[in-house]
Image (spheres, grey):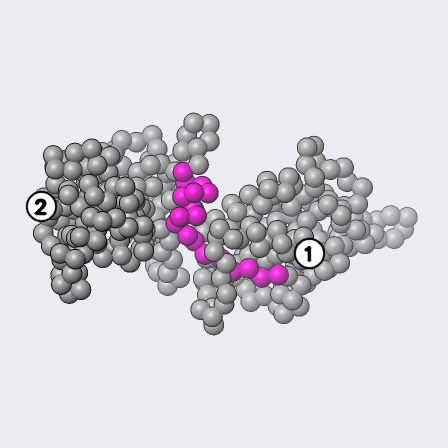
Amino acid sequence: MEDTIVKTHPAKLKKIIVAMMAAGIVPMVWGDPGISKSAQIYQVADMLNLEPIDARLSQMEPGDLIGYPFPQDGRLTFLPTDLIPLEGTPLPDGKDGWLLFFDEVNHAAQDTAKAFQKVVLDRMVGQYKMHPECHMICAGNLESNRAGANKMTTSNASRLGHIYTYADLDQYLDDFALVVVNGIQNIDQRIVDFLLWKPEVFHVFDPNSLERTFPCPRTYHFLSRAIRPLRDDQIDIELVAGLIGTGTGHEFLTYVQNRSELPTLEQICADPKGTKVPTRGDIIYTLLSTFIMKLTVEQTPAVLTYIEPMSMEYQQYLMQGLSKRKTAALACPEAAKWVAKFAKEVIA
């Protein structure tokens, strides 16, 4: 069923969220665990100059949404908590309002989910009106993720606008990993290079796996924090596997240990015939995979000269990889000449 759902590319996610909010609709963002749904929602708060409020519905009780009983003049009245801004609440300093982020919505207990309906539809906390500049957004994991999510009731689902998204490496690199804050790149360059070499392990989620962790944007962030102060030879497999999983952990460590033998694109372009060609097959494939992800049309002539001593198996791997990516790197006369010369091998 989920395979037929229209999914939003992460690069468009914030645009769709803002469009729903402008129409007075509360967006509900769905996706696998660890794909940075929360991070993008906080980026929306920054875009709209709103103060974010983290409200984990899974950790809330009905009273947090409708108020708690309090005796007054011989009767009980329901007093709201200070979590949700109400009419008359002063705006946060320098902000235009709030973005009330209800995370883990479909992990909530049934009674809490029922109380949530009035908040979303009526913008009421018990008998109190929500502040007109308090905007809401929700997020949750898919039921198929087996992450403890409950099936959302139709009454709650029909009150929300639903957006399904996924992890995308290019967007992750541009919007987060390569961003420099206070002179430090968000994600350690060794992880960036590894993901460019092997993009298929950027997000690998198997709800049936017995491992406690898996590679995803969240866990690569953890790995970056852990290895940033360490040299290549100080990184232990136990550390890496405990953050991104055993299989990908071994691949990452092998890549890091061998990367010193890998020439850079800059070195190759400066001296394509004089730059040493690796002899080990796994290192050659590492190098060629990097070419497939990074090569520009200006660099292609030098790289084609560099790979001439390699066997046809390796040359074919590179050219077919570039072709599958439909990259502009092949839009040069040298690439056309190579294809014409080795057409039979490429087709084979």
Q: Toward which corner of the image does residue 211 lie, by quadrant?
A: bottom left
The quarter of the picture where the C terminus appears is: bottom left
Residue drawn at 55 percent across, 67 percent down: 151
Q: Position of residue 100 (x, y in %)?
A: 65, 47
Residue, disc 1 = 23
Find the residue positioned furthest to the front.
Answer: 333
Residue drawn at 79 percent across, 51 percent down: 129
Residue drawn at 43 percent across, 43 percent down: 174
Q: Position of residue 279 (x, y in %)?
A: 9, 44
The numbered disc on residue 115 is none
Residue, disc 2 = 309
Does the magenta segment cover residue 168?
Answer: yes
Say which element carries label 1: loop
| Lower sequence index among marks 2 and 1 | 1
**Part of the protein shown in magenta:** 161-178
Q: CA distance from mark 2 to mark 1?
A: 61 Å
Residue drawn at 48 percent across, 48 percent down: 36
**Identity of the amino acid at label 2?**
Pro
Find the residue positioned furthest to the right.
Answer: 73
Q: Is residue 206 visible?
A: yes
Q: Position of residue 333 (x, y in %)?
A: 22, 49
Q: Nearer the viewer, residue 80 or 314?
A: 314
Q: Toward which corner of the image does residue 254 lie, by quadrant?
A: top left
